Image (spheres, rainbow, N blue to C red):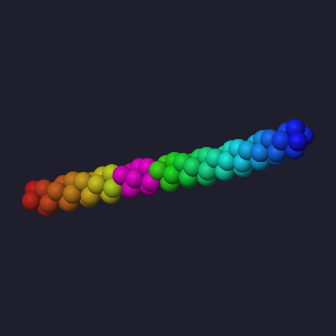
């Protein structure tokens, strides 16, 4: 009778141990997925920042060109008047 009881306790212990291991594996997988999402999110943010910087540089360059054209136009008009 004692051996049957100990056998039952052992089975319960192994079952609980397996369940804990499975739970740890699931948690590990979930953490990995979260890390991947976090890394992907960081990469996307970096790409967006780079795009913003590129867009800003492009706009700055266009503004310089416009101002330069405007100055040239004014100089030509002044020369024509004189």
In the image, taking residue 25 as reference, residue 46 lies left or right, namely left
Tag count: 0
| Residue 61 spot, x, y in % from top left | 35, 53
The quadrant holding residue 2 is top right
Of residues 62 and 45, which is closer to you in this image?
45
At 33% across and 55% down in the image, what residue appears? Answer: 59
Residue 5 drawn at (x, y percent)? 83, 41
Examine the rendering and report whether any part of residue 21 can be seen.
no
Q: Quadrant of residue 16?
A: top right
Which quadrant holds the N terminus? top right
Q: Is residue 46 left or right of residue 12?
A: left
The furthest residue to the front: 1
Q: 40 or 47, which is in the foreground?
A: 40
Does the magenta portion include 49?
yes
Residue drawn at 13 percent across, 56 percent down:
78
In the rendered structure, which segment of residues is drawn in magenta?
48-58
> In the image, is residue 7 part of the stretch drawn in magenta?
no
Q: Is residue 59 left or right of residue 36?
A: left
In which image quadrant can residue 79 be found?
Answer: bottom left
Q: Residue at x 16, y 56 (%)?
A: 74
Question: Which of 30/43 is in front?
Answer: 30
Q: Residue at x 24, y 54 (%)?
A: 67
The answer to whether any part of residue 6 appears in the image is yes
Measured as percent of width and height from the top left, residue 45 is found at 47, 50
Instruction: Name the magenta segment's main secondary structure.
Output: helix
Q: Quick one: quadrant of the C terminus?
A: bottom left
Q: Residue 50 location in percent, x, y?
A: 46, 51
């Amino acid at each position: 009778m004692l051996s049957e009881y100990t056998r039952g306790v052992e089975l319960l212990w192994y079952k609980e141990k397996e369940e804990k291991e499975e739970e740890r594996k699931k948690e590990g997988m979930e953490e990995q997925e979260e890390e991947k999402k976090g890394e992907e999110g960081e990469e996307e943010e970096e790409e967006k920042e780079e795009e913003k910087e590129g867009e800003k540089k492009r706009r700055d360059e266009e503004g310089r060109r416009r101002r330069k054209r405007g100055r040239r136009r004014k100089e030509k008009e002044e020369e024509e008047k004189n």
